Image (spheres, helix red, strand yellow):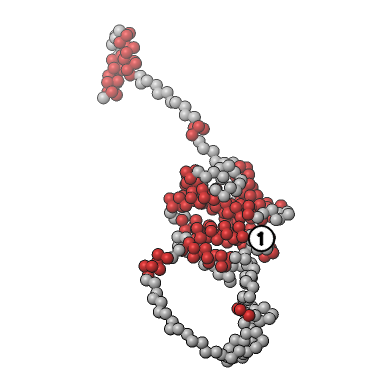
């Protein structure tokens, strides 16, 4: 409609119709649209620049340096520059922190330290047992350990008077001074105590009392899964060295986090609880924010940091605490 009216008015103006000048000015203003002024938007204000390559390289170098110091406890006099540069190159090309960590743990340098180190201190063993029972409690697939499956463990020191049944000492002494003798394939007829063989004596015995088994309900009430885990860990790792303890504990915390990975909210809750609990150990974790015991801070961090970085933060926690005991 406006287009038609515009054509009619223009025709009347240019066909010789003599409108007063004020009317003509109004008509021209109505016909000519108001110019639209485009506002210049400063796109740079809303543009988020990704970190530069140099910033990423610097961050990777700091993480790698920290990893080497934590893992080896400054036991390496010199970490070859070529090896460091090779690891840096891998990180800059996208290698995960966890992958580099495993590479250092299975490397020759770490295995050498683990095989030659002496038994860990009682404080380290106590902390390890406590933390393993915390980690494995509620896990769907906790790692099953035994004396055979744990590498680089020393032999158990049996109490005086009790030798390892599989490896008796030179005197052949077993429990209570009993001797072990080779009785051939038919087996022993009796155990020999001391130098003299004593004849068998008949001893009057009273009837064996009948003990009723506990009901299932009572058995469930008396169970303590956390204590059972702790007892098993103490049994298998009582004589482990510092480097074995660190390797096993850090591996299990990563396994725990893998189980929680599919439940981000549960992972965030667990991570915040874990970081707050370990922050109370009065150990310097290398940064003021790491030393904080703020639950909200760690919970929010778990929702924005990469899973790979969260794993390293948890591993770094254990590495520094166990190093502190030493």
Q: Is residue 69 visible?
A: yes
Q: Quadrant of residue 160?
A: bottom right
Q: Secondary structure at mark 1?
A: helix
The image quarter in which residue 30 lies: top left
Mark 1 lies on residue: 110
Name the image quarter holding the N terminus: top left
Q: Is residue 301 visible to us here? A: no
Q: Residue 88's x, y, as percent?
A: 64, 51
Is 107 or 116 nearer to us in this picture? 116
Q: Give x and y (percent) for residue 87.
A: 64, 53
Residue drawn 45% across the image and 60% down it: 138
Few, some or many residues within 10 Å of mark 1 (<14, 14–19, 20+): some
In depth, the one of 46 and 321 nearer the eye is 321
Relative to residue 233, is residue 161 drawn left or right?
right
* Percent of width and height locating residue 240: 62, 64
Image quadrant containing the C terminus:
bottom right
**Residue nearer the viewer, 55 or 35:** 55
């Amino acid at each position: 409609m406006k287009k038609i009216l515009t054509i009619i008015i223009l025709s009347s103006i240019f066909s010789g119709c003599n409108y007063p000048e004020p009317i003509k000015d109004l008509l021209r203003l109505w016909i000519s649209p108001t110019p639209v002024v485009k506002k210049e938007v400063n796109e740079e204000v809303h543009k988020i620049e990704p970190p530069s390559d140099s910033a990423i390289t610097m961050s990777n170098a700091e993480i790698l340096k920290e990893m080497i110091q934590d893992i080896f406890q400054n036991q390496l006099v010199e970490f070859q520059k070529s090896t460091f540069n090779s690891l840096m190159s891998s990180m800059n090309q996208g290698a995960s922190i966890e992958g580099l960590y495993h590479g250092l743990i299975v490397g020759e340098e770490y295995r050498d330290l683990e095989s030659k180190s002496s038994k860990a201190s009682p404080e380290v063993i106590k902390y390890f047992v406590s933390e393993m029972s915390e980690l494995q409690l509620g896990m769907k697939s906790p790692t099953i350990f035994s004396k055979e499956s744990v590498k680089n463990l020393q032999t158990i020191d049996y109490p005086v008077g009790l030798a390892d049944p599989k490896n008796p000492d030179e005197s052949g002494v077993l429990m209570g001074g009993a001797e072990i003798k080779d009785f051939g394939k038919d087996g022993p007829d009796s155990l020999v105590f001391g130098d003299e063989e004593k004849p068998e004596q008949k001893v009057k015995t009273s009837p064996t009392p009948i003990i009723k088994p506990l009901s299932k309900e009572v058995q469930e009430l008396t169970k303590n899964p956390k204590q059972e885990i702790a007892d098993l860990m103490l049994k298998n790792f009582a004589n482990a060295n510092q480097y074995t303890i660190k390797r096993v504990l850090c591996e299990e915390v990563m396994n725990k986090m893998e189980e929680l990975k599919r439940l981000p909210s549960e992972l965030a809750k667990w991570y915040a609880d874990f970081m707050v609990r370990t922050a109370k150990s009065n150990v310097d974790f290398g940064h003021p924010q790491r030393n904080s015991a703020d639950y909200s801070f760690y919970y929010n961090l778990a929702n924005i940091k990469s899973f790979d970085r969260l794993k390293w933060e948890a591993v770094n926690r254990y590495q520094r605490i166990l190093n502190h005991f030493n």
